[in-house]
Each structure stands twice: as structure tokens, then as C-alpha cells.
Amino acid sequence: MSEDLDVVEFGPETAVAERRRPGWRAMTTDSRLTTGLVVLAGAAAIASLIGEWQIIDTTRSGDEYFASIPQVTSSVWSTTGGTPYLSGLMLVAAATAVALFGPAAARSTARLAALGTSAVLLVVLAAAASVLSTTSELPRVFGGFMNTELLSRFSSSPGRGMWAALAAVVLLGLAMLSAHRQEPETARGRHAAADDGDESDDYESGDIDLTVTTAAPFIRQY
């Protein structure tokens, strides 16, 4: 003989946890975003070192010497703005390393240094790109032995190395901004956890266990 037993549960029903997509704030404070931005910035920085910074088009020169040389390119090592960029890139790389892997006390200062250097580099690269888009630097490129009339037939434009350098600086700046947003959130989470712990302690200390038993009858003796 079997009987069906009903299980009685007390207390509120357990709420079903709903899966929510991470919001924009959660994405911007994710450490993986900072890592991805730094990796992309490193790849762009390497591309800026091996790519051309200035492309000089000589197809309209009409000179026999340049008939077989349609383009003349310059790298970061010999073009305008190359030296400031290399110096600033080393400073930003060092500050980024300290901001990500250094002691906690130095990370905030390193982030500010990386952001400031990135902003200065961005201005320098923008000015260099403007200069490389003109023919004002062509006499220096060709050693000053060419006449002005021939140089006026050339055209100049920034190359892929210049655009890669701009991308590297922007990505590093975004990485430092992302890292800056993570620390306040972590500290806020610690304070919230401490407050929750205090509330739970107060709640537990407020519980009182009561035991109810039957009292012995009162007998009056004479």
C-alpha cells in the first residue's frame, strides 16, 4: 500500500533567474575590452614602424629618370614627425605597462601619463599628416638638388604607416580610458559588499529564538 505524500514548502517562491545581456556600462568596464584594445594598438604600432609614412607620386613629372619610379616612399625613420612619434610611443608603452601590471598605487598616475602622452602624440601626428599631404617637404626628401618646377609636378600623401600610427595612439588612449573606468567600479563593488555584509549581520543579530514550554502547575501549600 502506497500513499502519495505532499511536500509542503514554506517561504516565498524562488525567483527564476533571468539571463540578461550585458549593458553598455558592463562592456566598457570589462577587463577583456582593455586587453583587446591594447593588443590592437600593439599591432597598429608595429604596422606604423614597417609601413610607409609618405607616398610621393612622380607619374606626372615627365622626367626620364622617374619614368621607372612611379612612387617614392618614406618610412617613419626618415620622415617628418617620425622622431617625436617614436619617442612618445616608447613613453606611452611604458606607462601602459605600469597602468596594467604595475603596483596599485602607481596605476592611476601611469594611466594619466599615458592619456596625456597619447593626446600630445595625436596632435603631433595630425600636424605631420597635414605636412606630408603637401609638397613642402619634397626638397628635403630629394636632397635639394631638384628644381622647383619639377617638384611642382609631384604629389604627396600620407601612407599606411601614418594612418596605423594614428590608430595605435587612439586605441591606446581608449584602452587607458577603459582601464580608468574599471577601478571605481571595483571599489564601489567592495563598498557595496561591505554594506551588504553589515546589513546581513544586523539582520541576523535581530533574530531572537523563543522556546515555549508548558509551565508546572502552581501548588499552594498551607
Image (cartoon, rainbow, N blue to C red):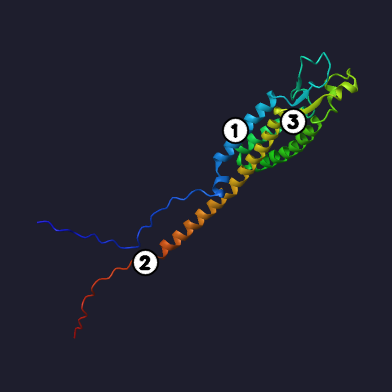
Instruction: Tell me the crowding category of disc 3: few under 14, some 14 to 19, or many 20 or more residues within 10 angstroms, Cα based.
Output: many
Residue in front for this viewpoint, 47 or 103: 47
Amino acid type of disc 3? Tyr
Instruction: Find numbered disc 1 in the image and state the secondary structure of the residue it sits on.
Output: helix
Amino acid type of disc 1? Val
- How many marks the image carries: the answer is 3
Give the residue at mark 3. 85
Instruction: Tell me the crowding category of disc 2: few under 14, some 14 to 19, or many 20 or more residues within 10 angstroms, Cα based.
Output: few
Compared to residue 135, the image places residue 204 above or below, namely below
- C-alpha span from label 2 to label 1: 57 Å
Q: Of tags 3 and 2, which is closer to the observer? A: 3
Instruction: Find numbered disc 2 in the image and state the secondary structure of the residue it sits on.
Output: loop
Residue in front for this viewpoint, 74 or 71: 71
- Residue 186 x, y percent position in the rendering: 55, 48
Residue under the image location 56 percent in, 49 percent down: 24
Decide if residue 15 is in sight here.
yes
Give the residue at mark 1. 39
Give the residue at mark 2. 208
- Residue 45 x, y percent position in the rendering: 66, 29
* Quarter placement of the N terminus: bottom left
* Quarter placement of the C terminus: bottom left
Residue in front for this viewpoint, 174 or 57: 57
Amino acid type of disc 2? Ile
Residue under the image location 57 percent in, 36 percent down: 36
Compared to residue 143, the image places residue 179 above or below, namely below
Contact? badges 1 and 3 (CB < 8 Å): no
Give the left or right position of residue 218, taking residue 133 as reference: left
Nearer the N terminus, badge 1 or badge 3?
A: 1
Compared to residue 215, the image places residue 30 above or below, namely above
Nearer the N terminus, badge 2 or badge 1?
A: 1
Residue in front for this viewpoint, 161 or 36: 161
